[in-house]
Amino acid sequence: MTLLFISDLHLSHQRLDKLDLFKNLLDGPAKQASALYILGDLFEDFWIGCDDQHHPNPEVISVLRNYSDSPQTQLFIMRGNRDFHLNNEFANATGCTLIDDPTVITLDNKKLLLMHGDTLCTDDVKYQKWRKFITHPLVKWIYFIMPFGLRKRIARDVRSYAADAVQKKSPEITDVAQSTVLETMKNFNVETLIHGHTHRQAIHEVDINGTSAKRIVLGDWYEKDCILIHDEAGYRFERVDAYIRVNS
């Protein structure tokens, strides 16, 4: 059984090469996998609703729909900090299953924890307070009853503020807090955690009460790109274009 994991694609009209790569992946070897998990930040701009018809949103939705319509595929998408507001309308349009953050699945008869990763960055206190506010059900409801133009302006202003705030923070603050990682893995009783968000692609060995565990961090799709594959050989990272070439 082959499972694929990606995150932080940040697809936009300004990076059409990555959009093409995404289409080639889903139209090609991803259809041979048992499941594809997208762990947040599929889009570069903040998601404001399915009524946003600006490129590449309609094309991305179409690609996802085509993939999920294949009889042998399963598509799971987790919300990230760029797409807090993915909702049932998006799920219906794409045919995906929206999964909570965090989500536990079973793989090789062991529990595996999936997260976007931003909630692990607990040293960034200001961000965690903002995240708690923006994901509150009442705030999300108010946002979606607003006219499209107002939602768009709010998203643009938030995007600008967030980009400026990140530039002023140290790399240590924007990375995960190790104490939070250990506490989270202990609470969910897992030996493997997969997450994105930090863009620091790596497989970390973690010690949990004397037990060897793994924290796998997915890379982003900016200058490079990555896909995490799990099959009979275990876990491995590959460049997406290389994975497509070998498996097409």
Image (tube, rainbow, N blue to C red):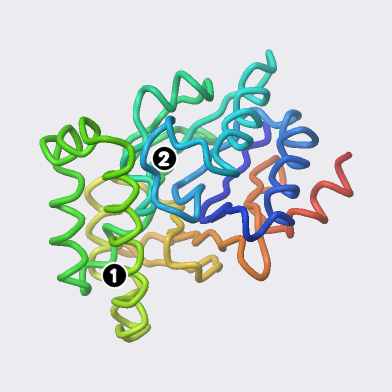
Q: Residues within 10 Å of mark 2 (few under 14, many from 20)?
A: many
Query: Which residue is the site of mark 1?
Result: 161
Front one among 103 and 80: 80
**Could you say where residue 114 lies in the image, as x and y percent from the top left?**
41, 45
Q: Residues within 10 Å of mark 1 (few under 14, many from 20)?
A: few
**Could you say where residue 150 lies in the image, as x and y percent from the top left?**
27, 45
**Could you say where residue 179 lies in the image, as x and y percent from the top left?**
23, 69
Judge from the rendering whether residue 207 lies leftward or rightward of residue 133; answer left or right. right
Q: Are circles 1 and 2 on residues that touch, CB within 8 Å? A: no
Front one among 50 and 41: 50
Judge from the rendering whether residue 16 lies leftward or rightward of residue 44; answer left or right. right
Front one among 94 and 6: 94
Total numbered labels placed on residues in the image: 2
Instruction: Assign the N terminus to one quadrant of the image.
Output: top right
Q: Secondary structure at mark 1?
A: helix
Instruction: Assign the C terminus to one quadrant of the image.
Output: top right
Give the label on residue 144, or none. Answer: none
Name the residue located 33 percent from the left edge and 82 percent from the top edge: 172
Q: Secondary structure at mark 2?
A: strand
Task: Please report whichever mark, 1 or 2, sits nearer to the chain's N-terminal start.
Answer: 2
Judge from the rendering whether residue 134 lies leftward or rightward of residue 98; answer left or right. left
Amino acid type, label 2 = Met
- The image quadrant of residue 32 is top right
Name the residue located 28 percent from the left edge and 71 percent from the top edge: 177
Q: Tell us which disc is closer to us: 1 or 2.
A: 1
Front one among 130 and 192: 130
Name the residue located 61 percent from the left edge and 30 percent from the top edge: 64
Q: Is residue 175 above or below residue 15?
A: below
Amino acid type, label 1 = Tyr
Query: Which residue is the site of mark 2?
Result: 78
